[in-house]
Amino acid sequence: MFMKDFVARIYGNKIRCCVTLIVLLLPVLDIVIYCCNLIRSGGSTIAPAYGTFLASNTTDHLVQIILLWFLPLYTLVITGEGPLEDRHRGYHRALMGRMGRNAYYTENIKCSFIFVFFLISIALLINLGLVSILCHGGKYIPIEVDDSPENLLYNLSNAHPFLANLGFIFVTAFLAGLISTVGTALALVTADRKIVYAVTFFLWFVPTSTNSSLLLVMQPFTEYDFETLLPIFLIVTAGYLILIRVLCFWKIRVSALE
């Protein structure tokens, strides 16, 4: 029931609905730009599995930067604004009275993750479907498939490129859901938008701007193997989960004393 209301509130707000649409359309824009450039300049059509949004071989990373680097800003507008609005209007007290404090916090957290996970999954799957149609028959592969015989992930990905894309799509959606949940947890703790947006973006910017960037975990067909990507994924995931747990536990304890 709460999930239904959660989604209804998003689509009932023009700004949040617009941002949701932007997130859905950015991966579509990526393949549209590629096709326009291909028609204008000619050249070989890229093999579909290597022309996906996450593979980043089509538009010089431009659209990927717009979506992935600034992902927390989109997710905060979509899922974080609900708790902020509740607190500013005092509506959160009515909801907690009806649902219970624990349920109010946990449902917001769960719905935030689920909505963004499916939003990103759908956006990237649409891109994968469009690339498969528009680049059907394409043979150009922008990497050396046999370049790293010792790299297990690289070889598995090139042997099964569409499965590799699916795997990275769901990893990306999972991480997007996590950072969305971090933002929602912060919004449940404080009603100060500046703090919520600044801290959430900082917590995303730090792991994505280092040499061992979190963005590497989202891109298939790179030279990085499991021993590089798994520690990045596990450390960031554990850090986000611990933070979410601490924020929610602390807020529930504090709310019980109010």
Image: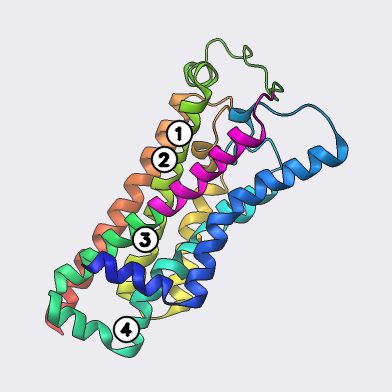
Disc 1 on helix, strand or loop?
helix
Question: What type is the residue that disc 2 sits on?
Answer: Phe
Q: Residue at 80% of width from left, 37% of height from top?
A: 38
In three-dimensional space, the C-alpha distance between marks 4 and 1, rounded to whole angstroms, equals 38 Å
In three-dimensional space, the C-alpha distance between marks 4 and 3, rounded to whole angstroms, equals 17 Å
Mark 2 near mark 1, Cβ–Cβ under 8 Å?
yes
Q: Residue at 39% of width from left, 67% of height from top?
A: 79
For label 2, the residue is: 170
Question: What type is the residue that disc 4 sits on?
Answer: Arg
Dominant secondary structure (helix, strand or loop) of the stretch shown in magenta: helix
Residue 158 to residue 63: above or below:
above
Mark 3 near mark 1, Cβ–Cβ under 8 Å?
no
Pointer 4 or 2: first along the chain: 4
Question: What type is the residue that disc 1 sits on?
Answer: Leu
For label 1, the residue is: 166
Residue 27 to residue 202: above or below:
above
In three-dimensional space, the C-alpha distance between marks 4 and 2, rounded to whole angstroms, equals 32 Å
* Residue 185 located left or right of residue 179: left
Pointer 4 or 1: first along the chain: 4
> Percent position (x, y) of residue 100?
12, 75
Residue 108: mark:
none
Q: Residue at 20% of width from left, 80% of height from top?
A: 95
Label 2: few (<14), some or many (≥20) within 10 Å? some
In three-dimensional space, the C-alpha distance between marks 2 and 1, rounded to whole angstroms, equals 6 Å
For label 4, the residue is: 87
The residue stretch that appears in magenta: 118-138
In three-dimensional space, the C-alpha distance between marks 2 and 3, rounded to whole angstroms, equals 18 Å
Q: Residue at 21% of width from left, 85% of height from top?
A: 93
Residue 182: mark:
3
In three-dimensional space, the C-alpha distance between marks 3 and 1, rounded to whole angstroms, equals 25 Å
Is residue 136 shown in magenta? yes
